[in-house]
Image (tube, helix red, strand yellow):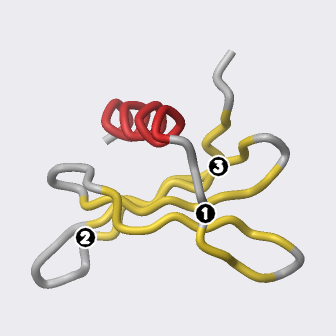
Amino acid sequence: MKPYEINNMIIDDDFDSEEYVTAEFTHENKDYSITFKKGDLEIINAWVFKDGTSLPANLADNIIELIREDVKKRI
């Protein structure tokens, strides 16, 4: 079983120069969002949602890599 669950994925291709992929997921009973450049899946930002606000997320490298691979398969 995966240590996270992707709940939603948005592919934003309306930007002039770059396309982005945002994955919203749950990990350890917390909601997160992580955005990658679509071309090379370089991480742009990651957020954790808590008490109605968003804060920069501090995710382990292995979780980011697992999500990156999952996103790669889905696009």
Q: Quadrant of residue 2?
A: top right
Residue 2 vs 16, above or below: the answer is above
Residue at x 38% of width, y 40% of height: 68
Q: Nearer the viewer, mark 2 or mark 1?
A: 1
Mark 3 to mark 1 CA distance (whole Å): 12 Å
Q: Which amino acid, by three-letter code, is at mark 1?
A: Ala
Left or right of 42: which side holds 60? right
Q: Position of residue 5 (x, y in %)?
A: 67, 37
Q: Quadrant of the C terminus?
A: top left
Total marks placed? 3
Question: On residue 57, which mark appears?
Answer: 1
* SS category of the residue bearing label 3: strand
Q: Nearer the viewer, mark 2 or mark 3?
A: 3
Left or right of 57: which side holds 50? right
Query: Dot 3: few (<14), some (14–19), or many (≥20) neighbours within 10 Å?
Result: some
* SS category of the residue bearing label 2: loop
Q: Earlier in the sequence, mark 2 or mark 3?
A: 2
Residue at x 46% of width, y 31% of height: 66
Residue underneath mark 2:
13
Residue underneath mark 3:
25
Mark 2 to mark 1 CA distance (whole Å): 24 Å
Q: Which amino acid, by three-letter code, is at mark 2?
A: Asp
Q: Position of residue 22 (x, y in %)?
A: 45, 61
Left or right of 43: which side holds 59? right
Q: Quadrant of the N terminus?
A: top right
Mark 2 to mark 3 CA distance (whole Å): 21 Å
Q: Earlier in the sequence, mark 3 or mark 1?
A: 3
Q: Position of residue 63 (x, y in %)?
A: 53, 36
* SS category of the residue bearing label 1: loop
Query: Dot 2: few (<14), some (14–19), or many (≥20) neighbours within 10 Å?
Result: few
Q: Which amino acid, by three-letter code, is at mark 3?
A: Phe
